[in-house]
Image (cartoon, rainbow, N blue to C red):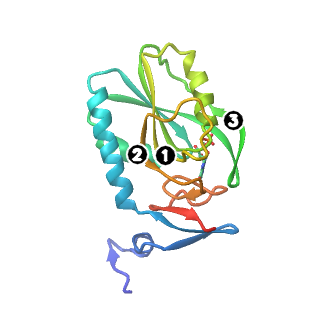
Amino acid sequence: MPIRKVTGFTTFALQKKTDRMQSVSLHDKEFVLYLEEDKIQKAIEKMAKTLEKEYAGKDVVFVGVLNGCFRLIADLMKYIEFEAEVNFIKLSSYRGTESTGKISDLMSLNTDLRNKHVIVLEDIVDTGHTLDYLRDVLKEKELASLKVASLLFKPDAFMGRHKPDYVAFEIPNLFVVGYGLDYDGLGRNLNDIYQIKS
Ligand code: IMP
């Protein structure tokens, strides 16, 4: 395939990303294409419209759970038309493809959330331990309301107290990568979501 030139740069990197790969290898594991980029984008736009109906005119703070939410939050914000603050918290529970069940708070929230309507943004809710932990942290902060929006939800793995309020895709209990989700640090840059090959 010829490589076009744009303002002196080759478009090789761009070309590679737009040619959708049917499978990817990361470290020792192989993953197969599961959710395509355009499906993900449409679901995020729909989520934004739902949030708009419920939250327009309210004092809203989105709280993104790092690292995995960075792509979701960037894309969701493209479709959100009401005024809202954006903040982040960094939590970690995963090692490899297994949840450890122990949550570490790696970067705390540094903003006053009193009387704010908080929408937590998660890339994925799996066992639900992370959400339970976060709810306990946020309970102390006298919020006006608290809801959770997640791109992905694994109902068969869930053991938490409250399911997420807004979910774009319910998926089987299989490890996935791409669109912000990683396997030991790799795969976050993929535009599509891939499922582990069984
Ligand atoms: P939970 O506490 O088990 O619900 O897991 C929450 C966190 O684990 C997510 O925010 C992800 O960072 C990570 N995680 C859970 N399932 C997957 C997966 O299938 N792929 C990549 N990361 C995952």
Camera-side mark, 3 or 2: 3
Mark 2 crowdedness (10 Å alpha carbons): few <14, some 14-19, many ≥20 = few
Q: Amino acid at mark 1?
A: Phe
Name which residue lies at 45% across and 74% down.
16
Tell me if 139 is positioned left or right of 185 in this view: left
Q: Are marks 3 and 1 in contact (CB under 8 Å)?
A: no
Q: Earlier in the sequence, mark 3 or mark 1?
A: 1
| Residue at mark 3 | 103
Q: Is the CB of the residue bearing disc 3 within 8 angstroms of ligand 1? A: yes
Residue 153 in percent (x, y) is at 51, 45
Relative height, residue 190 to residue 41 (above, below)? below
Tell me if 15 is positioned left or right of 173 in this view: left
Q: Are marks 2 and 1 in contact (CB under 8 Å)?
A: yes
- Determine whether the residue tagged by mark 2 lies in a helix, strand or loop: helix
The answer to which of 92 and 198 lies nearer the viewer is 198
Using the rendered view, name the quadrant where residue 188 is placed. Answer: bottom right
Relative height, residue 139 to residue 161 (above, below)? above
Quarter of the image with the C terminus is bottom right
Residue 56 in percent (x, y) is at 27, 27
| Residue at mark 2 | 74
